[in-house]
Amino acid sequence: MAKISEEEEELRRLSLEMRLLEQTAETLQQRISMITAAMTELSYANMTLESVEKEKEDTELLVPIGGGSYLKAKLAAPDKVVVGIGAGVSVEKTLQEAKAVVKERIEELEKTLNSVQQQFAQVAERINADRNRAESLLAKMREGKASSDV
């Protein structure tokens, strides 16, 4: 039974670590996508609130219901907005309060996005360092094998 060299052992360890880091990077990339999608949705909400602010009561609107379809509706109270606060619960707020809530949520998501992007950069940096070390070890092992074959 052949003895495993230190280089082979380190190569196995690096391989395992790189697989784990790649899974972590994939998870972080998914989080970045989810956060970006939430920020986009909140940006649309913010633009809609700004547009509604300029409208008068009884103005006819097209309300998106999904799938590129809309309902015609009349604006009953342009100064009142129903805002989701989580767990399926919504509360009525003034238009200004709703805009502040949306802005605050966007700011929170921006902070979270920055944090996750930093984590992703650190993981990617570690993957590259491990890959470089593995390539170096492989080259060293090939040199050792070539010189022992002579």
Image (cartoon, rainbow, N blue to C red):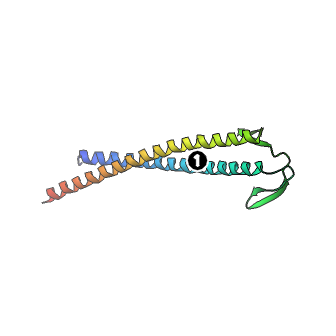
Residue at the farthest bottom position: 68
Q: In the rendered image, is residue 20 in sight?
A: no
Write the residue at 76% across / 56% down.
64
Residue 144 falls in which quadrant of the image? bottom left
> Vertical placement of 62 versus 83: above or below?
below
Q: Quadrant of the C terminus?
A: bottom left
> Residue 66 location, x and y as percent?
74, 57
In front here: 25 or 115?
115
**Left or right of residue 114: residue 57:** right
Residue pointed to by mark 1: 35
Write the residue at 77% across / 50% down.
54
Badge 1 element? helix
> Residue 138 location, x and y as percent?
26, 54
In front here: 59 or 126?
59
> Residue 97 location, x and y as percent?
73, 38
**Left or right of residue 121: residue 104:** right
**Left or right of residue 9: residue 17:** right
